[in-house]
Image (cartoon, helix red, strand yellow):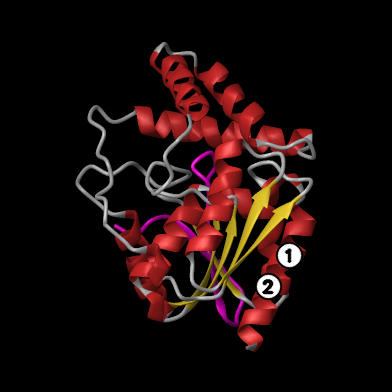
């Protein structure tokens, strides 16, 4: 299958990869700005998010991304990833270094990170709420945890909508199919990378941002003093400017 996606604009290709709290709509605030800046912009929904249904057979998110780029005729792309999407972007860049021109990671996740006791407890609380059918409370737990202090009510409403949709999609199948794990050495991700952390993010993800930047061979780490875990939703215009500045630099090089 081809995961649900949208394409707009002409120029160098940029693929936007969403957080697992969201779907492709999280990039609404950057979509037009990137297109108007002269890029061919693609955004997609991973399986079980947005308009892409859950898988009914074994699959790989990385293979899904490869097939999407092949279908669109994109040989080389800049990847922009938020949280889970940042983890997928890093792994894809390591697996296919010849196809990735640059990485911009916003509060990325990492498969190498050992979660703290606090993060494990948070996950157990979310699972408890979901299993007891208290989805509204599970949604609010995510909204309150992952959005920083600059998020307005519109951003909070958007995350509520996207997270609720994801919960409902993922609870619908009788049997859950987990993605196939591919062992990837992220040090093979040689593309120039800019890794953003958020000062108001949970401690685990602040550490991950710094650790990922230290591990990648050609990366810079910056911490945004105003940001929580989802800066693209918290200050959309400012994040658009940051993305466009980094893309202009790497495509000029």
Whether residue 82 is visible, yes or no, is no
- Stretch in magenta: 1-23
Question: Crowding at label 2, few (<14), some or many (≥20) Cα neighbours within 10 Å?
Answer: some
Q: Is residue 152 above or below residue 243?
A: above
Percent position (x, y) of residue 46?
A: 42, 50
Q: Secondary structure at mark 1?
A: helix
Seen in the picture, residue 145 relative to 3 is either above or below; the reply is above
Closer to the camera in the image, 181 or 159 = 181
x 53%, y 61%: residue = 214
Mark 1: give few (<14), some (14-19) or many (20+) Cα within 10 Å: few
181 horizontally vs 149: left or right: left
In screen coordinates, is 131 left or right of 182? right
Q: Is residue 239 left or right of residue 58?
A: right
Mark carried by residue 246: 2
- Residue 146 visible? The answer is yes
The alpha-carbon separation of the residues under discs 2 and 1 comes to 6 Å
Residue located 22% across and 30% down the image: 175
Vertical side of 30 occupied by 75: above or below: below
What residue is disc 1 on? Answer: 242
Q: Are marks 2 and 1 in contact (CB under 8 Å)?
A: yes
Residue 114 lies in the magenta-colored region: no
The quadrant of the picture occupied by the N terminus is bottom left
In the orientation shown, which residue stands out farthest toward the top?
Answer: 132
Q: Main secondary structure of the magenta part?
A: loop
Q: What element does badge 2 sit on?
A: helix
Q: Residue at x 55, y 61 (%)?
A: 213
**Is residue 34 rendered to the left or right of residue 69?**
right
The correct choice, above or below, for 88 with respect to 42 in the image is above
Residue 16 in the magenta stretch? The answer is yes
């Amino acid at each position: 299958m081809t995961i649900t996606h949208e394409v707009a604009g002409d120029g160098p290709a940029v693929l936007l990869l969403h957080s697992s709290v969201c779907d492709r709509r999280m990039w609404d605030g950057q979509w037009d700005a990137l297109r108007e800046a002269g890029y061919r912009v693609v955004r997609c929904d991973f399986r079980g998010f947005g308009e892409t249904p859950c898988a009914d057979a074994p699959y790989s998110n990385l293979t899904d991304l490869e097939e999407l780029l092949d279908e669109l005729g994109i040989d080389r792309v800049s990847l922009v990833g938020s949280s889970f999407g940042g983890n997928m972007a890093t792994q894809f860049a390591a697996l296919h270094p010849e196809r990735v021109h640059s990485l911009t990671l916003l509060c990325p996740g990492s498969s190498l990170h050992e979660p703290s006791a606090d993060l494990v407890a948070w996950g157990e609380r979310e699972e408890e709420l979901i299993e007891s059918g208290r989805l509204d409370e599970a949604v609010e737990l995510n909204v309150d945890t992952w959005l920083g202090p600059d998020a307005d009510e519109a951003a909070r409403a958007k995350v509520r909508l996207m997270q609720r949709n994801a919960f409902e999609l993922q609870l619908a199948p009788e049997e859950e199919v987990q993605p196939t794990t591919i062992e990837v050495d992220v040090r093979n991700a040689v593309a120039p990378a800019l890794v953003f952390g958020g000062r108001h993010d949970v401690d685990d993800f602040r550490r991950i941002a710094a650790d990922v930047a230290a591990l990648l061979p050609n990366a810079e780490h910056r911490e945004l003093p105003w940001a929580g875990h989802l800066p693209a939703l918290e200050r959309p215009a400012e994040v658009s400017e940051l993305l466009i500045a980094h893309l202009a630099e790497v495509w000029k090089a």
